[in-house]
Every structure is written in structure tokens, then in C-alpha cells.
Image (cartoon, rainbow, N blue to C red):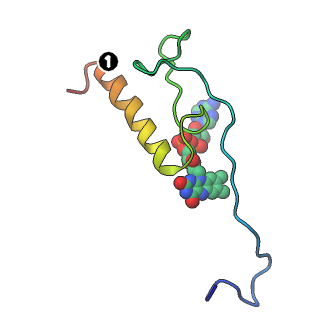
């Protein structure tokens, strides 16, 4: 890897990450928790994303739905 492996490198190692094995339940239509009113599990920690783009898309989906619910979105 040109420009990456150098004599100045202290450690060269694999970059790794893991995704949450837990999924907080949510209604597939309303996206809110089945028992807890106004809780909208979303993104990686809630188990609905596995990377930057999927987390952003899931967050946007929930944000639009909540905005519609409170009348801030057409
Ligand atoms: C080392 C590493 C490398 C990665 N590389 C990539 C990559 O190359 N490409 C890729 O697609 N994905 C990558 N990811 C994954 C990506 O970063 C995550 O999937 C994404 O950031 C998840 O977004 P999120 O908004 O769901 O969660 P987060 O970005 O974790 O946001 C959660 C937010 O909630 C806040 N929070 C937590 N608890 C509370 C609380 N009690 N009260 C208030 N706020 C709270 C936190 O401070 C944080 O700001 C990487 C992850 C790591 C760790």
C-alpha cells in the first residue's frame, strides 16, 4: 500500500468494528416502540443500521415521520 506502509508507522493493524446484536422493538409502520409512547428506536445502537449511510437513512426516516406527526412536515 503505497504511502501507507512507512518506516515511521508505529503499529499497522486491521481497522475493525462490530454491529449491535440487540434490536429494540418498534412498530414497522409508526416506527415507535410498541409499549413506550414517543420512543423511536433508530440507528445502529437500536439495531436498525450497520454503517454511516444506513444509520443516516434510518434516522431521516424516523425524523420525517415524527415531523409529520407533529405537523412540521408536509
Ligand atoms: C472504528 C469505526 C469505524 C467505522 N467505520 C465505518 C465506515 O468506514 N463506514 C461506515 O459506513 N460505518 C463505519 N462505522 C460505523 C458508523 O460509525 C456507525 O454505524 C454510525 O456512526 C452509527 O450512527 P448512529 O447515529 O446510529 O449512532 P452514533 O453515531 O453512535 O450516534 C449516537 C449518539 O447518541 C449519543 N448518545 C448516546 N447515549 C446518549 C444518551 N444517554 N443521551 C444523549 N445522547 C446519547 C452519542 O453521544 C452519539 O452522539 C465505523 C464505526 C467505528 C467504531
Task: Say if 63 sits above or below 69 in the image.
Answer: below
- Outermost residue, right side: 10
Q: Residues within 10 Å of mark 1 (few under 14, many from 20)?
A: few
Under 8 Å from ligand 1: the CB of mark 1?
no
Counting from the top left corner in percent of width and height, residue 49 is at 54, 40
Q: How many marks?
A: 1
Q: Quadrant of the N terminus?
A: bottom right
Q: Quadrant of the C terminus?
A: top left
Q: Residue at x 48, y 45 (%)?
A: 54
Counting from the top left corner in percent of width and height, residue 10 is at 79, 79
Q: State which quadrant residue 15 falls in.
A: bottom right
Q: Residue at x 49, y 23 (%)?
A: 40
Counting from the top left corner in percent of width and height, residue 68 is at 29, 22
Image side of residue 40 versus residue 22, left or right:
left
Task: Say if 41 sits above or below 1 in the image.
Answer: above
Task: Say if 11 sits above or below 60 in the image.
Answer: below
Task: Say if 37 sits above or below 42 in the image.
Answer: above
Image side of residue 5 versus residue 10, left or right:
left
Q: Which residue is mark 1?
A: 69
Q: Residue at x 26, y 25 (%)?
A: 72
Q: Residue at x 76, y 75 (%)?
A: 12
Q: Which structural element holds mark 1?
A: helix
Counting from the top left corner in percent of width and height, residue 17 is at 69, 53
Amino acid at each position: 500500500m503505497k504511502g501507507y506502509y512507512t518506516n515511521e508507522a508505529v503499529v499497522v493493524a486491521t481497522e475493525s468494528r462490530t454491529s449491535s446484536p440487540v434490536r429494540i422493538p418498534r412498530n414497522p409502520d409508526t416506527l415507535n416502540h410498541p409499549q413506550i409512547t414517543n420512543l423511536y428506536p433508530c440507528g445502529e445502537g437500536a439495531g436498525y443500521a450497520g454503517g454511516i449511510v444506513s444509520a443516516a437513512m434510518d434516522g431521516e426516516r424516523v425524523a420525517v415521520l415524527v415531523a409529520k406527526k407533529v405537523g412540521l412536515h408536509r
